[in-house]
Amino acid sequence: MTTAPQTRHVPDRLNSRAARIFKSWEALLLAVAIAIFVINSFASPYFLSAWNLSDATFNFTEKAMIAFAMALLIISGEIDLSVASIIALASTAMGLALQYGAGTPELVIIGLTVGVLCGAFNGFFVTVLGLPSIVVTIGTMSLFRGISFIILGDDAFRGYPASFSWFGQGYIYWVFTVEMLLFVIIAVIYGVLLHKTNFGRAVYAIGNNPTGAMFSGIRVARVKFILFLLTGLMSGVAAVCLTSRLGSTRPSIATGMELEVVTMVVLGGVNILGGSGTIPGVVIAAFVMGLVTFGLGLLNVPGIVMSIFIGLLLIGVIALPRLWAMAAARRTP
Amino acid sequence: MTTRIAPAPAPDVSPIVSMDMITKTFPGVKALDQVKLDLFPGQVTALVGENGAGKSTTVKILTGIYQPNGGTIRIDGDPVVLATPDDASQAGITAIHQETVLFDELSVAENIYIGHAPRTRLGLIDKARMHQDASALLTEIGAPFSSHTQLRDLGIANKHLVAIARALSVDARVVIMDEPTAALSHKEIEELYELVETLKSQGKAILFISHKFDEIFRIADRYTVFRDGAFVADGQISDIAENDLVKMMVGRSVEQIFPQTNHEIGEEVLKVVGYAHPTEFADINFTLNKGEILGFYGLVGAGRSEFMQALFGITKPSKGVCRINGNIEVIRSPADAVANGIVYVPEDRGKQGAIIGLPIFQNITLPSLDKTSRKGFLKLAEEFKLAREYSQRLDLRAASLDQDVGNLSGGNQQKVVIAKWLATQPQVIILDEPTKGIDIGSKAAVHEFMAELAAQGLSVIMVSSEIPEVIGMSDRVIVMRDGRIAAEVEGDDMTPETLVRHAAGITTPTEGAAA
């Protein structure tokens, strides 16, 4: 029996940075993305075309903008299922403003403001009244879209100004779209916010143990409220892009998008119960979903079959590491 | 010391359960290294060791929660694999855990029989029989409540009785008691001892885990000592002296004496005026001086923790203000309290103290992020520096600072929580039951540390239910009873008798009035 040394040296880290990255979820997901890319390029002769690939990014850019904010919200232990309905309401508000002669700057401001207000509405019920976010946002999911339906009925708002179409249809350079640029900027902002700031650390702390975070002097309610505001704001941004791209507003706009956003976040390795996940993971997940949808589209696979594929992909990618661990555990009794 | 009823065991009795060369590793940590443990019928075996010695891991292996990486478990001499908690239960092993998992929303009977409720012929739960059996069990252990009671309506001591009843409801041959007396009052502890004697007479093997030596010598027949995950010794309790057992446990001799507290007491730091809460406490007034250790003594439920949490801004008092360094401050949230230099080390470290899931260094820097960051942006190098400094100061035992704090033993988690608060350089540190459930070696270290903090000019409020600790450490003691200050004693008046009398509300001519 050796005696313990008087002062213990505890190393900062055991694994090197490279080892941590190599073993990460993101690495696995990147491998999946590359595999899908390769399979797609063999499956269809039209896949490896710069313009086609550029078009394909529209499959995920708008969803991903919301997914980044949603990732933070889910890491903190909350969720917002009303995001697609916020898009509907924000788009309707923009269409309504259009009827009163609003120009492009006003339309954008109105879209973003409605998004933030909807986020504040959700945030109020969750952080001030302490209601569960899943219940609150299922409620507001119906509420926000319901308001759109009341305003629009079977109608649609059309006739957005030409300058407004820049957001969803414009190109920055060659095949690179405005939405792609927004996607990159927003990804960087959220990546920095989550991984490099005190605010991001608070999000992780809250997600792992809200009581402990509160006992550590973190203003839990404030952080969560801000996250709802951000998710609302991103829904507003997505509303501007989507409305601009479609050139019209119907109350059914973006129906079902909330689940695709959540799928993207979970596929990106964010724990649905909160506490862990990364923005790079969500970025790769966005590409994976975009590539799968685009590849299947080129093969003329109908939309409903596509959603089956996405569902299987989600379950498969999530189950894989678990199956792996179980197999490993069986090998070493 | 009390006489023990059990005779020395006959040497030819063979153990019911025998663990041999059991090893368990976690990423980066070897929790158990080829340990052995034998449990004999009709005998109480005390498993002794410091925090992190591997006691809880052993319990989890015996109850099928963890799988050992090596070694053999034998029951009645036959090797067995306890792959699931159900296997352990089938093998007749049952445990009363340190922090028992019970269900607040269910009745007492449902809690006792969850997972193995009696069934009717249709396969539905036979409620009548369940309540009947539960009542019988509750009577047997002397529980003062009905099987129909909702669990949430019970206090912590009574919940513990439910946990015991649940352990006994399966036909157990081996009963594991993991710090069963930690939350119990003196009278309840006596009742538990009687219960243990009953179980012994029924031929059950009992594994008893406790940090209290008087308890071990009172109730155990045998001892097994682990240290840092390794087996040290075992034998008959009657063959060993308390000091030798302590030495084996910590690998060195520990002074049972409290550190000298000859620190300088300075000017007033904190004055609490008229703190009141609708239900939990009322009329709390006291002052705290620089470099002072102020003890808060009282029975469980006297409102000490509730008041401390209000002082820390967690629960909102209905009335009351603080004067901190001469300025009137209203503390509305823990963030306010931290900003005013008041920090709180909670009793429930798993839920309120450590953030399980985050690495050690992030736990330590969490309230100090403003200092280690620039303009809200993290600086990892600064964080590691701060974490290193304070983990060394508290002699933290861990594989790395990047390790999940959840993989640490209870005592080391407590060190992380204390380190977290010291790193904020507070003026007032509130320690709520700082040594509850930690071993004698760590206890002495905590006491030493507390004295050191006071000597450095920090003001300490220590909530404790252990009289020797309160008297040994405090410069002054406030006794609470039923949410009010019953007495404030200092100097030679701090005797066990005085404290107990005030806490229990026994009237004597010398009783001190509330301030």
Image (spheres, coloured by chain):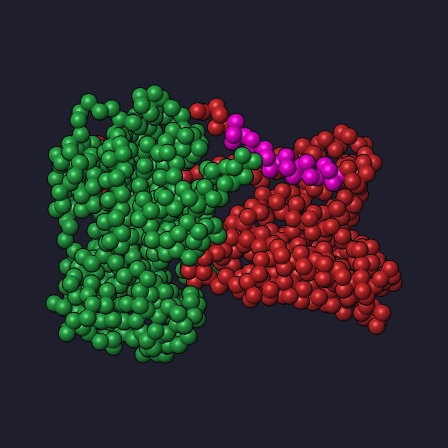
Left or right: B427 in relation to A118:
left
Q: Which secondary structure is most common in the magenta stretch?
A: helix
Count of numbered circles in the view:
0
Left or right: B394 in relation to A82:
left
Left or right: A45 in relation to A330:
right
Decide which of A155, B101 is in the foreground and name it: B101
Residue lying at 56% horizontally and 65% vertically, measured from the top left: A129
Residue lying at 75% horizontally and 57% vertically, measured from the top left: A241
Asked if residue B92 is positioned above or below residue A257 in the image, the reply reads above
Extent of the magenta region: A306-327
Asked if residue B201 is positioned above or below residue B319 in the image, the reply reads above
| Residue B497 covered by magenta stretch | no
Decide which of B232, B267 is in the foreground and name it: B232
Q: What is the residue that sits farthest to the top in this orientation?
A: B78
Q: Which chain is red?
A: A
Q: Visible in this render: residue B24?
A: no
Asked if residue B333 is positioned above or below residue B320 in the image, the reply reads above
Q: Position of residue B265 (x, y in %)?
A: 20, 70
Quarter of the figure with the N terminus of chain A: top left
Asked if residue B12 is positioned above or below residue A250 in the image, the reply reads above
Residue lying at 67% horizontally and 56% vertically, measured from the top left: A138
Q: Position of residue B164 (x, y in %)?
A: 34, 44
| Residue A311 covered by magenta stretch | yes
Quarter of the figure with the C terminus of chain A: top left
Q: Visible in this render: residue A82?
A: yes
Q: Which chain is green?
A: B
Q: Position of residue B392 (x, y in %)?
A: 30, 49
Residue lying at 45% horizontally and 41% vertically, measured from the top left: B129
Left or right: B221 in relation to A161:
left
